[in-house]
Amino acid sequence: MLEKVKYIVVDLDGTLVRTDLFVESLLRYLKHNPINLLRVILWLMKGRAYAKEKIADNIDIDVEFLPYENQLIAYLKDLKEQGKTIILATASHRVYADKVARFLGIFDDVIATADGQNRKGRRKLAAIKELIGDAEFAYAGDSAADGPIWKAASANIMVNAPRNNVAEAEKANKLVWQSRATKPVWRAFLKEMRPHQYAKNVLLFVPLVTSHEYMVASHLLSVLLAFICFSFCASGVYFLNDLLDLEDDRRHRSKSSRPIASGALSLPLGVAGAVGFPVLAFTVSLAYLPMAFVAVLAVYFLITNAYSFLLKRIATVDVMTLAILYTLRVVAGAAAANVELSSWLIAFSVFIFVSLAFMKRYIEVSSLTKKSGQVRGRGYSGDDSETMFSLGITNFTAAVVILALYINSDSVVRLYKSPEVLWLLCLLVLFWGNHIWVCARRGEIPDDPVVFAIKDKASRLVGISFVIVLFLAKYAAF
């Protein structure tokens, strides 16, 4: 079918790369300053082509780390060796299209948005005809917008195309090559939600345990619903974080496999998750939970957004912000159940969460291959690893001291039948702190210490033992 075809025309967004360069550059532009959204709206009012040009003037994209469709590229290289003329035709701006073409080195010509012309759909087809005349061509595309071009082409190459378009191509005997995603989109969406991170939100139940109100069904149900709302809100934040950190994540050893960074999940679906989950969380919490919880959730959401846009890039401030976000989960649990929040619990939480936040940064910094290297998107270099290790150990030790002072306080005698049993908690926390910091030092924690703790057998045993000691101290008389 391709014997008589001289030209192979290839789409860029969603076809050659598993992303949309306009949406990606737009997100990066907004990351620098969210207020830029007003400027973008004004540009869009003057036309999509104008907006693309203005964004391209302000944002540069490193094409080396884009998520390319490698199977398609290999196929195009084979066609190139057969003497075919390969043309890149895209609605993305010419600046980005030219960079991709130069990087791959397989294209003979480029058609792209420029000079006020948004080359998408029929406009792209007109540009193709203007370039090659009435010559037969094959077209590689991915979306329904490519329908008119597939119909005009002599042969169709399809990448994750809609099933109805694939069926039309097969019926017309035009389909010469296609590829489909190996995993369904819903799996990528679920993975991007990061349900394993919901384990952090178990902290909402801590005030219920420390206030000994866990037998009150209404309190338990309130905290359970708060847990769900907090988890949905957190998922929205994860979506937003990954949308804003695309370039940095693609350079990271493990984050490059995240659904948005790898292109397994489209950017529009990423935006839908970033907006939809927080809206759902606040809608449910406003309907069924106390306003105090809604207020804490709002503070959490505002701080996480400030962290995503700015605070994560400021050394030490980012660590303190992470610790505050962990502590807010404890405060939210107390607000949801309407129970008193102990100052001892807050003090213990702050120190232990600062330690864990330093550990998260220590893991990133210690993974640098060069001591003088800089962590992308963060305010740290390789020289900071020993400082963060020392600060992390110090803060964890302070948390154990707070716990010991609490056990020795008068309030413990009123709350527990056998308060002396609580001293075992100090040993458990000391063991766990030493264990995870030694693991971090050895490089056994790949990324997030919380995720590591969920999978780590020793950490799970410590958690179970912690609960057993609390219940023995409360109900057993020795």
Image: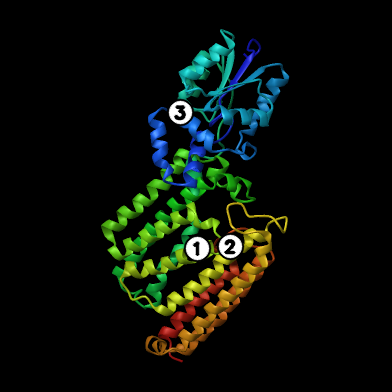
Mark 1 residue type: Leu
Q: Which x, y percent locates residue 178?
A: 58, 26
Left or right of residue 99, residue 450 in this image: left
In this picture, is 327 found above or below 280? below
* Residue drawn where x is 53% and y is 69% of the image: 354
Residue denoted by label 1: 322
Q: In this rendering, is residue 193 above or below 21? A: below
**Residue in the foreground of this view, choosing between 39 and 441:** 39
Q: Disc 2 residue type?
A: Lys
- Give the residue displayed 44% in from the left and 63% down from the top: 201
Query: Quadrant of the image for the N terminus?
Result: top right
Residue 457, quarter of the rendered image: bottom right
Give the residue type that dot 3 points to: Tyr
Of the residues under marks 1 and 2, which one precedes in the sequence?
A: 1
Q: Residue furthest left?
A: 287
Among the two numbered marks 3 and 1 on one chain, the one whose residue lies closer to the N terminus: 3
Query: Which residue was labeled with disc 3?
Result: 50
**For numbered disc 1, what is the local secondary structure?**
helix
Q: Nearer the viewer, mark 3 or mark 2?
A: 3
Q: Is the residue under label 2 in contact with that under label 1 (CB below 8 Å)?
A: yes
- Structural distance between the alpha carbons of marks 3 and 2: 42 Å
Q: What whole-number distance in Å separates the C-alpha atoms at marks 3 and 1? A: 39 Å
- Element type where label 3 sits in the image: helix
Sequence-wise, the earlier of marks 3 and 2 is: 3
| Left-right relation of 22 to 226 | right
Image coordinates for residue 49, horizontal then vertical, percent:
46, 27
Label 2: element kind: helix
Q: CA distance from mark 1 to mark 2?
A: 10 Å
Residue 390 seen in the current view = yes
Q: Is residue 446 above or below residue 22?
A: below
Judging by the rendered image, the residue that carries numbered circle 2 is 360
Residue 222 coordinates in the image, percent (x, y): 32, 65
